[in-house]
Image (cartoon, grey):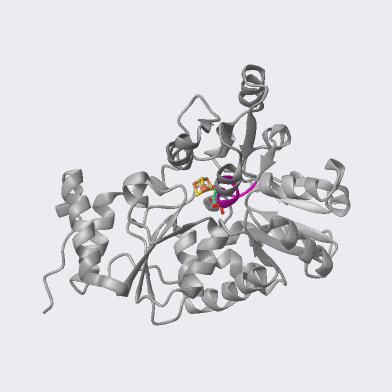
């Protein structure tokens, strides 16, 4: 029996306990028709409902493997787009709040990247000399752009392998939107700073001279993550002074100086696995989003591990936090009642080409 569609406003002011109960009831009604994927930054009151969790690479693999009718994605918009592109045509991907975006992904648009490509073409032949590489934190039309120009997608856990692939294709890389991941990865591969140039997308020709463009081996889009830019080298130095035996682990979206001062740098999944595998009674400073750090601090406390957040300020992914219990309850109840709300559906032409760029990535990860 089809029930009248429920409006989100009926859920907005539901007490927490009611929300949790309704999420569980809707999930029970849906059974195996639904799978809940959650990124590691998801808030605790949503994360606890996840069937599967991971970093961006793991979540994209999981999305391509699940057979559930509905994939409810507790993450941000680009992650749900990837799930839509990699899942089967009959599966539906739902993002419980459509305003859950990524501010870094928004720093590169197709119009800006196409303009950059045209401006680069006044200096050299980009299709002959440059492999475009987009971080997975980008819209589907940019992944499609990369596929059309012989490029590829990368994540924080495979960026080095992807850059190696990219240099096997052409002599230069245009890396967007995160300058920090691009810079850190190139540095790890032994590239000196003078081979890197930063493309300021607000300036004509990226603010670069023709000579700088000819010289660069990697051109880094001037994008960044507003959460990870809050972690500063001084935070690491203060921790090391107080706790010389302590260990520091950071996400590669942190600036180069923070990464260089860290003992380990890696994706969210790598951060969790590294601390999980560490000896008991170790002390950690962690440079990534607050929800993840708070969760592992609790989880590993019984092993005597002391886990501290890198910044004295609160650095949360506020857009991911928009996936809250009221939105999750609303999305699931609507599905259980036969109404699909907030479906993420990538346009056919972008879906086909971005799948190609993602499959290239998956095959060399
Ligand atoms: P991971 O792929 O490491 O989970 O990173 C995603 C992200 O957006 C980090 O800010
Ligand atoms: Fe985007 Fe930063 Fe949030 Fe990651 S933490 S999803 S890069 S805004």
Q: Report whether 11 appears left or right of 132.
A: left
Residue 323 visible in rendering: no
**Residue 98: quarter of image:** bottom left
Residues 144 and 3: in front is 3
Q: Is residue 226 depicted above or below 343 in this figure? A: above
61 or 330, nearer to the observer? 61
Q: Quadrant of the C terminus?
A: bottom right
Residue found farthest to the top: 242
Q: Is residue 145 left or right of residue 257?
A: left
Quadrant of image for the N terminus: bottom left
- What residue is shown at x 84% (from left), y 54% (from top)? 217
Which of 120/104 is in front?
Answer: 104
Is residue 77 visible to us here?
A: yes
**What residue sits 79% from the left and 45% below the top?**
187
Residue 52 is left or right of residue 159, and the answer is left
Image spot of residue 154 (x, y percent): 65, 60
- Residue at 53 percent of width and 33 percent of height: 305
In the image, residue 200 lies in the stretch drawn in magenta: no
Q: Is residue 73 left or right of residue 59?
A: left
Label tally = 0
Residue 10 position in % (x across, y down): 14, 54
Which region shows up in magenta? 266-271
Residue 270 picture location, percent across and down: 60, 50
Residue at image x 64%, y 47%?
A: 266
Q: Main secondary structure of the magenta part?
A: helix
Where 353 sits versus 159, above or below? below
Q: Position of residue 360 (x, y in %)?
A: 67, 72
């Amino acid at each position: 029996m089809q029930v009248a569609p429920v409006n989100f406003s009926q859920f907005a002011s539901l007490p927490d306990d009611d929300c949790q109960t309704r999420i569980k009831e809707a999930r029970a009604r849906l059974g195996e028709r639904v799978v809940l994927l959650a990124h590691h930054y998801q808030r605790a009151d949503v994360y606890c409902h996840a069937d599967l969790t991971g970093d961006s690479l793991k979540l994209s693999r999981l999305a391509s493997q699940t057979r559930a009718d509905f994939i409810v994605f507790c993450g941000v918009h680009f992650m749900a787009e990837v799930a839509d592109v990699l899942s089967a045509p009959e599966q539906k991907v739902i993002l419980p709040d459509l305003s859950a975006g990524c501010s870094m992904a928004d720093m590169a648009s197709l119009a800006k990247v196409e303009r950059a490509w045209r401006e680069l073409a006044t200096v050299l032949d980009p299709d002959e000399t440059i492999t475009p590489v987009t971080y997975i934190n980008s819209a589907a039309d940019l992944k499609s752009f990369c596929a059309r120009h012989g490029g590829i997608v990368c994540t924080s856990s495979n960026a080095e392998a992807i850059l190696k692939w990219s240099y096997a294709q052409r002599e230069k890389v245009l890396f967007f939107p995160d300058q920090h991941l691009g810079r850190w990865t190139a540095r790890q591969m032994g590239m000196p700073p003078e081979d890197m140039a930063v493309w300021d997308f607000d300036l004509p020709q990226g603010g670069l001279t023709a000579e700088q463009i000819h010289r660069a081996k990697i051109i880094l889009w001037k994008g960044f993550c507003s959460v990870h830019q809050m972690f500063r080298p001084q935070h690491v130095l203060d921790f090391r002074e107080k706790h010389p035996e302590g260990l520091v682990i950071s996400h590669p979206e942190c600036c180069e100086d923070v990464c260089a001062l860290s003992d380990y740098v890696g994706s969210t999944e790598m951060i969790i696995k590294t601390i999980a595998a560490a000896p008991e009674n170790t002390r950690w400073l962690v440079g990534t989003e607050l929800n993840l750090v708070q969760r592992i601090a609790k989880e590993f406390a019984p092993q005597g591990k002391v886990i501290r957040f890198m910044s004295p300020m609160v650095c949360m992914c506020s857009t991911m936090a928009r996936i809250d219990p009221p939105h999750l309850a609303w999305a699931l109840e609507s599905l259980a009642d036969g109404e699909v709300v907030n479906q993420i559906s990538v346009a056919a032409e972008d879906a086909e080409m971005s799948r190609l760029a993602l499959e290239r990535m998956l095959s060399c990860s």
